[in-house]
Image: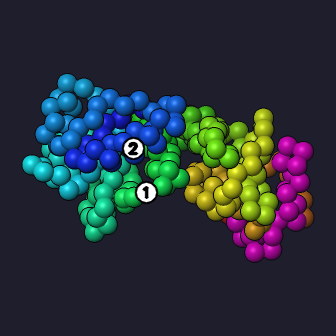
């Protein structure tokens, strides 16, 4: 993912670059310290993503954004929360308030990755869904490393005390996150929570028998409070 940083503070560039260096698919194209410098660069170059500060000299961040006829994906990085609504009106994908953690940064990158990998041309719903599922990936933090996982391979998710297990076709990953936090990274229509400790990929459900779900040799319990979620897909 080719990215551009537009910020008048050197420390902001340093933090974003350090975060991006932890992700193998991120490639820095240029550091711009004002919007005019970025306009000049974008006249002859193309990027996939812009990290955009708002309060800059000469030309403010959103004013710069309005000059672009076909802007790339944009993540705002700013210390000012009051401009968030205007940002989303300009189709900004995420709004990071400084200082932001790597976990919050990674969540924003996952949003961009999902958008970039969604097919741009109009297709039938079946083909579109197939392409989307085969392309989507997320990064998960395990101890001091980050593991890239294909969403399409996930069978189910299980809460295990202070950890969450992601069981895929090929491996089991244990991370220190809540099930709800993982579900926020995943397509809403592809995963449902069926128990306070379990969420499943609907397409891998082989059989529902009483209060149990069978998935690829695994048996998942169904909680009383979550039966309504299953009723939605059964209809």
Q: Which mark is residue 53?
A: none
Residue for badge 1: 100
Above or below: residue 110 compared with residue 226: above
Percent across and percent down for residue 186 are 60, 51
Callout 1 environment at 10 Å: few (<14), some (14 to 19), or many (20+)?
some
Above or below: residue 235 compared with residue 72: below
Q: Residue 43's image quarter? A: top left
Residue for badge 2: 16
Above or below: residue 2 compared with residue 89: above
Q: Earlier in the sequence, mark 2 or mark 1?
A: 2
Closer to us: 31 or 151: 31
Q: State which region is magenta.
A: 211-229
Horizontally, is 29 left or right of 113 in the view? Answer: left
Q: Residue 16's image quarter? A: top left
Residue drawn at point x = 69 percent, y = 56 percent: 176
Horizontally, is 222 left or right of 24 in the view? Answer: right
Residue drawn at point x = 32 percent, y = 52 percent: 76
């Amino acid at each position: 993912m080719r990215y551009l940083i537009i910020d008048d503070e050197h420390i902001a560039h340093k933090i974003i670059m350090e975060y991006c260096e932890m992700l193998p698919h991120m490639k820095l194209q240029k550091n711009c310290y004002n919007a005019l410098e970025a306009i000049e660069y974008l006249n002859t170059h193309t990027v996939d993503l812009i990290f955009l500060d708002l309060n800059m000299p000469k030309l403010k961040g959103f004013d710069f954004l309005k000059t672009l006829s076909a802007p790339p994906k944009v993540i705002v990085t700013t210390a000012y929360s009051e401009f968030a609504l205007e940002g989303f009106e300009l189709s900004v994908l995420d709004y990071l308030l400084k200082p932001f953690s790597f976990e919050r940064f990674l969540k924003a990158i996952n949003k961009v990755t999902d958008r970039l990998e969604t097919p741009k041309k109009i297709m039938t719903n079946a083909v579109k869904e197939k392409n989307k599922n085969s392309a989507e990936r997320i990064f998960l933090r395990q101890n001091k490393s980050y593991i890239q996982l294909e969403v399409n391979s996930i069978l189910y998710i299980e809460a295990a005390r202070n950890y969450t297990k992601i069981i895929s076709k090929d491996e089991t990953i244990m991370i220190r996150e809540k099930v709800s936090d993982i579900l926020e990274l995943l397509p809403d229509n592809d995963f449902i929570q069926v128990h306070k400790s379990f969420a499943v990929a609907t397409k891998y459900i082989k059989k529902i028998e009483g209060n149990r779900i069978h998935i690829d040799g695994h048996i998942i319990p169904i909680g009383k409070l979550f039966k309504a979620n299953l009723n939605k897909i059964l209809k």
